[in-house]
Image (cartoon, rainbow, N blue to C red):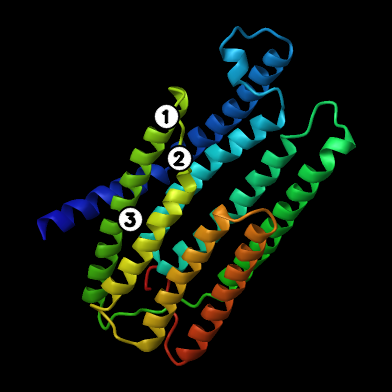
Amino acid sequence: MRFLLATERLFDRVEHAWEAPRTRRATGTGLVVLFVGSLAVVEANRQGWLPEPLASRVSTSHFTAISLAFTALLLIEVVELVLALARSVAASVGAQFELFSLILLREAFKELGKLPEPVVWAAAEGPVLHALADAAGALVVFVGVVAYTRIQRHRRITASEEEQGKFVQAKKVLALALLVAFVVAAVDDGWRLVTDNDPYPLFEAFFTALIFADVLVVLVSLRYTDTYAVVFRNAGFALATVILRLALVAPVYVNAALGVGATAFVIALTAAYNWARLGDEPLGPGAD
């Protein structure tokens, strides 16, 4: 019990510090500095101002700076996603799809980064089509996230305020463990990149961890409710995460199709869940 209370207090401190206006401004400023600095480094390499072996490791495409800035933005979104898990399982699922849509946009910019400068259409047709497919998939997922958010009706899955507090406490412990694991993996991945070792796919690994976290939430929720609709919804959310994980390693076109299919699935799942619990009073986020 002491461990749970200490972990919950630590999570609350991390959440408070992350959501502070000072942190928001710092992360925004950091993204701007990273983007402008990356553009400057790429341009310096194009002009031949960088010494070897640094020049051979820096891209000559300005789109690389956009991809790098989006990667940093994705890291921030992962933290938001993990913190959302403690507030609401449904909210964290919405954050997963937000993250996935941004990953698709990053992939689109990566494809555009393959274009030669100046652009020659003979070499641009493939990357442009791939970028359009990823961008279209991201747009459809974005629309789906808006629809998913609009139809949410948060309802308590526990029988009392005391049990609800314990359920939230368990989610905070899980979220903090997930956040620590992601930070360690991100630092290790960055170190591998700096030391010329092969980095592993960080976001794919994170979504794999999310699958197990979602399944654990299903099992933990059984301590507080055996309502069929709640169990089915949470298990369905875990399945949606599996589909997103597959989409991250799928080839172009298939990845967007899987993401769109998973989005449609969670919207239908949420609508059915709301129908199943039509007589229950909606509560604020954090109830489920």
For the residues labelled 2 and 1, say whether their Cβ atoms are less than 8 Å apart.
Answer: yes
Quarter of the image for residue 175 reads bottom left
User: Percent x, y for residue 274?
Assistant: 50, 84
User: Residue 11: image x %, image y %?
Assistant: 28, 50
Residues 211 and 37: in front is 211
Residue at screen point 54% across, 73% down = 266
Q: Is residue 8 above or below residue 146?
A: above
Q: Quadrant of residue 113?
A: top right
Q: Residues within 10 Å of mark 2 (few under 14, many from 20)?
A: some
Q: Earlier in the sequence, mark 3 or mark 1?
A: 3
Disc with the residue nearer the chain's start (2 vs 3): 3
The residue type indicated by label 1 comes to: Arg
- Amino acid carrying mark 3 in the image: Ala
Query: Please, is residue 122 above or below residue 77 in the view?
Result: above
Give the residue number, with chain letter if any, for mark 1.
192
Secondary structure found at label 3: helix
- Outermost residue on the left side: it is 2
Nearer to me, 249 or 67: 249
For the C terminus, the quadrant is bottom left
Quick one: SS at disc 2? Answer: loop
Looking at the rendered image, the disc whose residue lies closer to the viewer, 2 or 3, is 2
Q: Residue at 66%, 64% (x, y): give it.
A: 257
Indicate the amino acid at tag 2: Tyr
Residue 73 in picture, x, y percent from top left: 55, 41
Q: Which mark is residue 175?
A: 3
Secondary structure beneath dot 1 equals: helix
Q: Which residue is mark 2?
A: 200
> Furthest residue to the bottom?
279
Residue 285: tell me if it is visible.
no
**Dot 3, crowdedness within 10 Å: few (<14), some or many (≥20)?**
many
